[in-house]
Amino acid sequence: MIRVGSRKSPLAIAQTEEVLSQLRLRFPDEGFPVVTMETAGDRKKNAALLSLGRGTFSKEIERALLEGEIDLAVHSAKDLTATLPEGLALAGIVARKDPRDALVNRWDASLSQLPRGARIGTSSPRRAAQLKALRLDLRVLPIRGNVGTRLDKAGGSEYDGVVLAAAGLVRLGRQAEIAEYLAPESFTPEVGQGTLAVEVRVGDTRTVRMLDAIDHRPSSTALKAERSFVQRLGGGCKVPVAAYARLVGREIRILAMAGLPDGGRIFRADVRCDAGDPVSAGIAAAEALLAEGAGEIVGPD
């Protein structure tokens, strides 16, 4: 029996089932009971994400994993800290869903077509910076709640639209509500966006072997590069930095971004490196971004 840790939200449950469907297919005689948990981010529903910091949706689950209450945990990769707690590692990265951000709004309009002064909800500094860089006239407002709650607010009295991860909408079957998929070249996704990260205890060789059977190498390679980028550059939930990696033949292409929170300055880099060394590729992307001037926003460690 492999006990699986997950948050309680509908999206988290859908993500966990996405991983378990593959494990059950390959290991039909194994049991995979799901243990749902509430994290600090879930409890502090009215707190601004800026005040909570990265890891607020994963720390309690990681503690349960370290203490042996569960045997693996399924996370949105973008929720994890840049460096995992000692004793934990990632394994079994399944195929990434669409990494892009998606715009949903009352007019079903593209970003360029939104009326002046449209009220767009997001609590992500990365999304806010890029929205303001592209459309300074928009009113970018903080918003909290799960995906369903934010979608319900998108055409309400306080908001005209929201920006969400396309992958979450796809996993919940609500992609029909997307007005526009935002291009990574001008709206760089969060590190790990669209990717599910399965976390295990170091040394749990049985579980690691099982997860290796469902590992999607291109997605795993891209995630390694993106996490290496943010480890080198720094930043995260409070500083608008982002990277999106994908394999192109034998190379890995990484789009990287750092920006001022008000969108007044955005730094970008586009690098291609040997896909055989994703960690070095992520470091190279960070160095390229620093060379473009991003050190004014986030300096080296």
Image (spheres, helix red, strand yellow):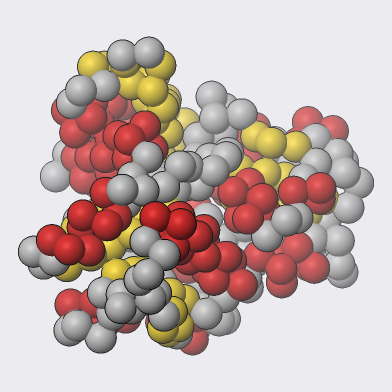
Residue 264 can be seen, yes or no: no
Q: Residue furthest right?
A: 107
Q: Which residue sits at x=66%, y=50%? A: 170
Relative to 256, residue 139 above or below: below
Q: In terms of image quadrants, where is residue 28?
A: bottom left
Residue 41, image x, y percentages? 45, 77
Relative to 62, residue 295 above or below: above
The quarter of the rendered structure image containing the N terminus is bottom left
Along the line of sight, the residue nearer the viewer: 145 or 71: 71
Residue 20, image x, y percentages? 45, 63
Along the line of sight, the residue nearer the viewer: 6 or 191: 6
Relative to 146, residue 220 above or below: above
| Left/right of residue 275 with respect to residue 203 in the rendered view | right
Residue 95, image x, y percentages? 45, 42
Q: Which residue sits at x=26%, y=74%? A: 71
Q: Residue furthest front?
A: 29
Residue 268 can be seen, yes or no: yes
Total of numbered circles in the picture?
A: 0
Q: Which residue sits at x=80%, y=41%? A: 179
| Left/right of residue 271 with respect to residue 117 in the rendered view | left
Q: Which residue sits at x=37%, y=61%? A: 27
| Left/right of residue 253 with respect to residue 300 in the rendered view | right
| Left/right of residue 157 with respect to residue 146 in the rendered view | right
The quarter of the rendered structure image containing the C terminus is top left
Q: In terms of image quadrants, where is residue 151?
A: bottom right
Along the line of sight, the residue nearer the viewer: 268 or 23: 23
Residue 126, image x, y percentages? 49, 47
